[in-house]
Every structure is written in structure tokens, then in C-alpha cells.
């Protein structure tokens, strides 16, 4: 009897949260081909795929995964860096965090980002 009551309480507490989360609309569609800029003026291409994997042409080519964190997308790369992609004032930005950087502190770099295509397999013009 006690276990049944616990399960009922669990569903009554968490079910509304799950329904709310599924109704949330993302701030933007991250899937596609992106150009991420560095503060030194250089750039690289990032392919964010529907299966939440990511690849870039930076260096020898990085691989990673991406996920939503609130209204931002965080991309985790195999080399320990991660990027945060977000929209602000009608433009996209990308903040990069070095492997040893405090993720709660300021970003290692912050610069513009451009969505080139909604198709992650497309080639830049």
C-alpha cells in the first residue's frame, strides 16, 4: 500500500513538469551548418545534426555532441572545449570555453556565429 502511494505522489509531482517541458518551444533551430567566429577574426564551420552530434573543420576536425541548456545550445567536443550557441538581439553568438576554464565563469572567447543553412550536410558558398 505504501509503495502505491509513493508512486502516485511521484507521478502527481513530476507529470506536470514533463508535460510543460514537452510544450516548450526552442529559442531557435540549431540543426544545420554554422560558421563560428573567433575573436582573432578566424572562423570554422560546425555541422549540428538532428541526432545531436556535431562535427567541425577546426584543426583536424572535431567531433562532439550538443544539447539544449535553457535557451542556449552547448556543444561538447572531444578535445575538452565546449561552445555555447545563443541568440541575442536578433543575432547569433558563440562563447567558447577552454578545457581548463570554469564553466560558471567568463567564456575563454565570445564572438559572432552565422547559420549558413538548415541542412548540416550542405557546403558553404
Image: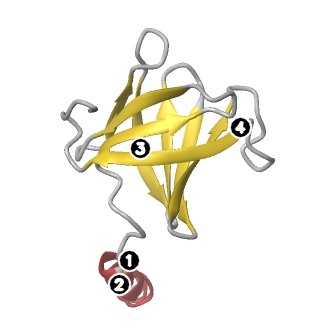
| Residue 38, position as x, y percentages in the image | 62, 32
Name the element at disc 1. Answer: helix
Q: x, y (%) of residue 112?
A: 57, 46
- Mark 2 or mark 3: which comes first in sequence? 2
Q: Position of residue 25 (x, y in %)?
A: 35, 76
- Which residue is found at the position 50% from the left and 68% from the top? 90
- Is label 2 or label 4 in front? 4
Quarter that holds the N terminus = bottom left
The residues bearing labels 2 and 4 have C-alpha atoms spaced at a distance of 39 Å
Q: Residues within 10 Å of mark 2 (few under 14, many from 20)?
A: few
4 left or right of 101 in image: left
> Which of pointers 1 and 2 lies earlier in the amino acid sequence?
2
Q: Which residue is mark 2?
A: 15
> Can you identify the residue that label 3 sits on?
66
Q: Which residue is mark 1?
A: 21
Mark 1–mark 3 Cα distance, whole angstroms, equals: 18 Å
Q: Nearer the viewer, residue 71 or 5?
A: 71
Badge 2 marks a residue whose secondary structure is helix
Image position of 119 with respect to 58: above or below: below
Mark 1 vs mark 3, foreground winner is 3
Above or below, 67 relative to 65 = below
Q: Secondary structure at mark 4?
A: strand
- Judged by depth in the image, the label closer to the viewer, 2 or 3, is 3
The residues tagged by marks 4 and 3 sit, at their Cα atoms, a distance apart of 19 Å
Amino acid at each position: 500500500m505504501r509503495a502505491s502511494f509513493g508512486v502516485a505522489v511521484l507521478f502527481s509531482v513530476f507529470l506536470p513538469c514533463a508535460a510543460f517541458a514537452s510544450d516548450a518551444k526552442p529559442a531557435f533551430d540549431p540543426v544545420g551548418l554554422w560558421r563560428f567566429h573567433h575573436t582573432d577574426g578566424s572562423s570554422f564551420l560546425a555541422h549540428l545534426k538532428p541526432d545531436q552530434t556535431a562535427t567541425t573543420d577546426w584543426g583536424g576536425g572535431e567531433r562532439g555532441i550538443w544539447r539544449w541548456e535553457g535557451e542556449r545550445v552547448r556543444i561538447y567536443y572531444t578535445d575538452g572545449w565546449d561552445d555555447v550557441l545563443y541568440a541575442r538581439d536578433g543575432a547569433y553568438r558563440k562563447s567558447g570555453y577552454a578545457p581548463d576554464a570554469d564553466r560558471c565563469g567568463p567564456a575563454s572567447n565570445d564572438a559572432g556565429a552565422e547559420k549558413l543553412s538548415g541542412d548540416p550536410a550542405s557546403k558553404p558558398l
